[in-house]
Structure formats: C-alpha cells, structure tokens
Amino acid sequence: MASQRRGRLRLRAARPLTMTTQLAYLAALGAALCWACSGMIAITPVRRAGSFPFNYARMLLVFAMLLLALAVLRGWPSLTLEQWLRLAASGLIGILVGDTILYTSLGRLGPRRNSIIFATNAPMTAVLGYAWLGESLGWRAVAGVALVTAGVALAIAFGGRRDDAHHWESVRGDVRVGVAIGLTAALCHAIGTLIAKPVMAAGVDPVGASAIRVGVSALGLTIVAARRGRAVFANFTPGTLALTAASGFVGVAVGMTLLLYGMGHGNTGVIATLSATTPVMVLPLLWIRTRQRPAAGAWWGALIASAGVALIFNR
C-alpha cells in the first residue's frame, strides 16, 4: 500500500502544472517578496521609534486592516472556546512576544542578518512538531535542520563586508545579543504556529484567525503600554507612522493574502518552501537599495538556509 501511494505521488509530480497551480506558486513567491520588503520598510521606524512602539502601532494598524477585510469579504468566524483560547495563546506568544523581540533583533542586526536568523523558525517548528505533536522527522528533516543551522552560521560568520557603509547594515550593540534575540523570536513564532495548528486544521478561516491573533496581541501591547506610564508614540513622526503602516500593509495585508491564495490552490509543502525564501529575496533588494553588493558568505548562507527549509517542508 505504501509503495502504491509513493507511486501515485510520483505520477502526480510528473504531471505538468496547471495555470492555477503556477499562479499559486507565484503567489507564494510574492508573499516572500512582501515579507522581505516589509522588513526593509520597518528598519527605519524601528530604529527611530523603538521596537515596542513600532510593533504596538503596527499591530493596531494591521488589526484595523484585518477587521475591514473581514467586514468586506468574509465576516467573523464561528469558533469554539478552545479554538479562541488556542488562537489567543498563539497570538500572545507568537506575535506579542515574538514580533516585539523580532523587531528588537532587526534594529540591532539590520534586515539581511535578521531575515536569515529568523529562517531558523522552520527547523524549530519541525523539531517541536516531532516532540510535541508526534509528527514524523525523517532524514530530510534532519538534513534540513543541519542545513539551516549551517546557513545561518555561514551568513553570520562570513556575511559581512569590511566596507559596509550603509546604516542598514550596521550592527548596534553586541552581535551575539542580537543573534540570541533573533533566535528567541524564531522560537516564539514556531511555538505560536504549533499552538494554532489544530485550529487551522479544523478549517477555520485564516483571515479571521489572524485577526484574533493580532487583536489579542494588540490588547496585550496596550496593557504593557499602560503599565509603562509614558508616551509610547512620542518618537513617532508622520513619516514614521506612514512607514509603519506600509510595513504592516505589505507584510500582513498583501503578503498574507497571497499566501492564503497559494495555500488554497497549491501543494502545502511547496507553498511553505517558496514563501520561506525571504532571506534570498532580501539580498538583491538590499543591493538595489544600498548599492552595496552583499558578501559571498551572505549569498551562500541564504541559499543553504533556504535549501534546508525546502528539505524540511518537502519531506
């Protein structure tokens, strides 16, 4: 029976892709491009306003966008109490904590290093899924974990250039602290994804689920901001707020929509792989924006990490 299934899988893989499937795969690549652009847009407001104010403002804006999308397109999803609690916990860990420290890492390391380090959320998800949900972890997944780890190490060790002059490529503070923060953010995102997985497997609308996760995160950030007792948005200018809104729109509104379309019309493993190519997407964008060619180590690190992601999600 297993051999018959493998045979059928090979037969399907050999068929030419339909136009719908091709569009789905292009949508996944578009989502990766959106996330790369979002990170580049975010670097300036993060460093001007701080990671917490940026993420707080971004979550409020994105929540408003998602509510508008639900009102126009779908309506609010019907959920059980357990599903609400799962999505709330997923939002608190994956977005409130994960995104806040992710943008702390972005402010310290810049978009290139940060995007490559964040790619480690893929092997973390695979390992935790094996330990927590009992998912299989075959040789491809193990090899993928090793490749992503090697790619990140290569990009960190050999990805810089001595003549890096653009402020986006500057490292602020101890690079080891920035790497540790980035890895923690990746872990939070992996945990948040796994908490929400049973809800999504039940067929809950992804836009509604995202709205709940983002809304809970925005509420949590509001409570934290109130306890701080000072003006959170004091360093925001109209330009900073515009960049924050643009980052949220490109990264969540457009990027999420493209990913949802891809998931609905293409192979899930292929879509996940293509949408995880952000570390590769960000390199030419940085080259165009800064007019500084990334070092060979950055290219090789990004490619090796992406190859590891491909092995993990196509096992």
Image (cartoon, rainbow, N blue to C red):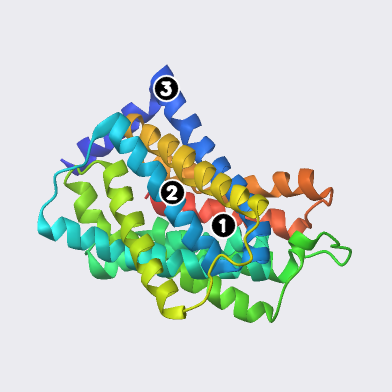
Residue drawn at the location 84% of the way across and 48% of the way down: 291
Tag 3 residue:
17
Residue drawn at the location 48% of the way across and 44% of the way down: 275
Q: Nearer the viewer, mark 1 or mark 2?
A: 2
Mark found first going from the N terminus, 3 or 2 = 3
Mark found first going from the N terminus, 1 or 2 = 2
User: Of all residues shown, which one is farthest toward the left?
Assistant: 80
Could you tell me the amino acid type at mark 2?
Val
Residue 37 point in image, percent of width and height: 61, 45
Q: Is residue 221 visible?
A: yes
Callout 2 crowding tier (Cα within 10 Å): few <14, some 14–19, many ≥20: many
Tag 2 residue:
62
Tag 1 residue:
305
Image quadrant assignment for residue 132? bottom left
Could you tell me the amino acid type at mark 1?
Ala
Residue 235 point in image, percent of width and height: 64, 66
Callout 3 crowding tier (Cα within 10 Å): few <14, some 14–19, many ≥20: few
Residue drawn at the location 43% of the way across and 18% of the way down: 19
Q: Is residue 6 above or below residue 150?
A: above
Circle 3 sits in a helix, a strand or a loop, which is it?
loop
Q: Using residue 249 as the reference point, say whether residue 203 is left or right of it.
A: left
